[in-house]
Image: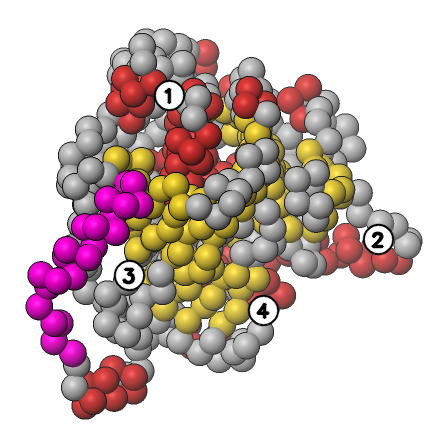
């Protein structure tokens, strides 16, 4: 099978010029999962190839926030970092932040694709598509994940997608989540530590990402690093909630010196740039090798720079001037109490000669009743009897407040959230009293060998299942 045939097979995508018709995929050595339902141990549903079939819906629908006064809570928080403030459960979705960052792995097939390619520029294209896809699940996800407790962990093994992952909350103030994932044969290693800074600005909540993502491809002796774009949730007080991602993402290939510069466009006054991502790949001498464009909510494409520039010049000569808003309309939009939700723009206009790099997968039909979760997100807090015996006692799936919220018991979830936070505060006071330092279990503070910056490095050993010295956090 050629590389192009493999790409078409695992993505299920054709190089058409439309972003319609999203498709899903499963990856395991380029084999497909056949939907069938033989029984596994303890009644676990298995598919024909022996891989466990995961759930497709949450146990209970999302609760209504319509009667909740957000302003009564947030009016005292303007300009402050929200990670230091206890927030009511009405703001949450039933996932821990450790589970939320695991959603980076939904489109792992792009890493497998990169690993198969012999050309470094094509590998960078696949890595760039993976970096964009890693934030795609945030589209319309306006709920806040639960802050992980210090020492909390989450593991995920997905044979069908070809990876396993372990993450740990390694610091509480500031809140830092470290993660490490690898393929079965260590064909790739993807790791990082994330320190999100959340601030409330009156009408919106801004999440500024801190920390570095590192992807290693040992077969090619390559390592790539990048940080995620910033994210803003608008209208947390009044109006329809909507999300934008913005900022510059620079992906560096530390072996070849090649870089991919991606600009996540801010919405802009007229909503013209909403969701758009544009950028390019350059060699170590800063020569542009490839143009990349699309939307982080839809798809990403690549094209030769000369072809792209020629098309844009031709297009510009043939386009009529856009009608601009009057000063009166601009004043009105700036003085509205809510940030106007931009009208959904047309799908990405594909320049002839472009090659599709990635397309977002469709969401469950009733995703709106499930916190706008993707198919992947719906599975993250699933807990079956087989799994429960393997998990560390600190795993998110065992956390009672998240479990209660997922089951629709908001009152008990709120009580448990308060109990766990109080237990964490009491433990911190006890350590201070005894002059004890918190000791992480699976990650150690060190230096990222590629950036030279401080980073949390996986110490190994989690999958040996030796859970001695795990803290009692629940």
Q: Residue 212 appears at what percent x and percent y? A: 59, 47
Q: Residue 27 shows which numbered tag?
A: 1
Give the alpha-carbon distance from disc 2 to disc 1, as whole Å.
45 Å
Horizontal and vertical percent position of residue 428: 77, 55
Q: Earlier in the sequence, mark 3 or mark 4?
A: 4
Q: Which comes before the other along the chain, label 1 or label 4?
A: 1
Mark 3 or mark 1: which comes first in sequence? 1
Label 2: element kind:
helix
Disc 4 to disc 2, how far (Cα)?
A: 25 Å
Instruction: Give the CA distance from mark 3 to mark 1.
Output: 31 Å
Q: Which mark is residue 431?
A: 2
Residue at 31% from the left image edge and 66% from the top image edge: 267
Label 4, on which residue?
81
**Which residues, given as a range, are shown in magenta?**
303-324
- Measured in 3D between alpha carbons, the distance from the residue under mark 3 to the one under mark 4, in whole angstroms, is 26 Å
What is the crowding at mark 4: few (fewer than 14 residues within 10 Å), some, or many (at least 20)? some
Marks 2 and 1 close (CB-CB < 8 Å): no
Residue mark closest to the camera, 2 vs 1? 1
Horizontal arrangement in the rendering, residue 461 relative to residue 183 (left or right): right
Image spot of residue 57 (x, y percent): 31, 36
Q: Nearer the viewer, mark 3 or mark 4?
A: 3
Q: Position of residue 162 (x, y in %)?
A: 46, 21
- Name the image quarter holding residue 26: top left
């Amino acid at each position: 099978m050629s590389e192009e045939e493999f790409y078409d097979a695992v993505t299920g995508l054709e190089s058409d010029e439309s972003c319609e018709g999203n498709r899903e995929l499963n990856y395991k050595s380029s084999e497909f999962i056949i939907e069938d339902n033989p029984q596994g141990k303890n009644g676990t549903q298995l598919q024909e190839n022996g891989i466990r079939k995961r759930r497709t819906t949450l146990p209970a629908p999302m609760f209504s926030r319509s009667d909740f006064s957000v302003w009564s809570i947030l009016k005292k928080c303007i300009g402050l970092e929200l990670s230091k403030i206890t927030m009511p459960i009405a703001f949450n979705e039933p996932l821990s932040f450790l589970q939320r960052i695991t959603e980076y792995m939904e489109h792992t097939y792009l890493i497998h694709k990169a690993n198969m390619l012999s050309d470094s520029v094509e590998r960078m294209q696949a890595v760039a598509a993976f970096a964009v896809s890693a934030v795609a699940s945030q589209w319309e996800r306006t709920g806040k994940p639960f802050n992980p407790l210090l020492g909390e962990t989450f593991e995920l093994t997905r044979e069908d997608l070809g990876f396993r992952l372990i993450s740990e909350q390694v610091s509480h103030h500031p809140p830092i989540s470290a993660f490490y994932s690898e393929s079965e044969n260590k064909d790739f290693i993807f790791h990082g530590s994330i320190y999100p800074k959340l601030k409330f600005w009156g009408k919106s909540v801004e999440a500024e990402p801190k920390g570095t993502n590192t992807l290693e491809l040992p077969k090619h002796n390559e390592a790539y690093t990048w940080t995620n774009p910033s994210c803003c949730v608008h209208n947390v007080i009044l109006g329809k909630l909507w999300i934008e991602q913005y900022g510059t993402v620079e992906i560096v290939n530390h072996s070849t010196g090649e870089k991919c510069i991606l600009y996540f466009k801010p919405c802009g006054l007229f909503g013209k740039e909403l969701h758009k991502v544009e950028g390019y790949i350059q060699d170590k001498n800063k020569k542009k090798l490839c143009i990349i464009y699309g939307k982080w909510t839809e798809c990403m494409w690549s094209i030769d720079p000369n072809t792209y520039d020629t098309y844009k010049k031709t297009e510009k000569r043939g386009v009529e001037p856009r009608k601009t808003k009057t000063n009166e309309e601009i004043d009105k939009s700036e003085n509205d109490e809510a940030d106007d939700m931009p009208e959904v723009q047309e799908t990405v206009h594909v320049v002839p000669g472009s090659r599709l790099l990635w397309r977002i997968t469709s969401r469950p039909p009733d995703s709106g009743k499930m916190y706008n979760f993707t198919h992947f997100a719906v599975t993250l807090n699933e807990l079956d009897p087989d799994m429960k015996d393997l998990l560390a006692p600190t795993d998110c799936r065992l956390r009672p407040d998240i479990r209660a919220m997922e089951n629709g018991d908001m009152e008990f979830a709120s009580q448990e959230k308060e109990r766990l936070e109080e237990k964490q505060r009491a433990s911190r006071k006890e350590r201070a009293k005894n002059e004890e330092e918190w000791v992480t279990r699976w990650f150690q503070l060190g230096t990222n060998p590629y950036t030279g910056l401080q980073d949390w490095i996986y110490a190994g050993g989690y999958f040996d299942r030796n859970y001695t010295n795990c803290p009692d956090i629940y």
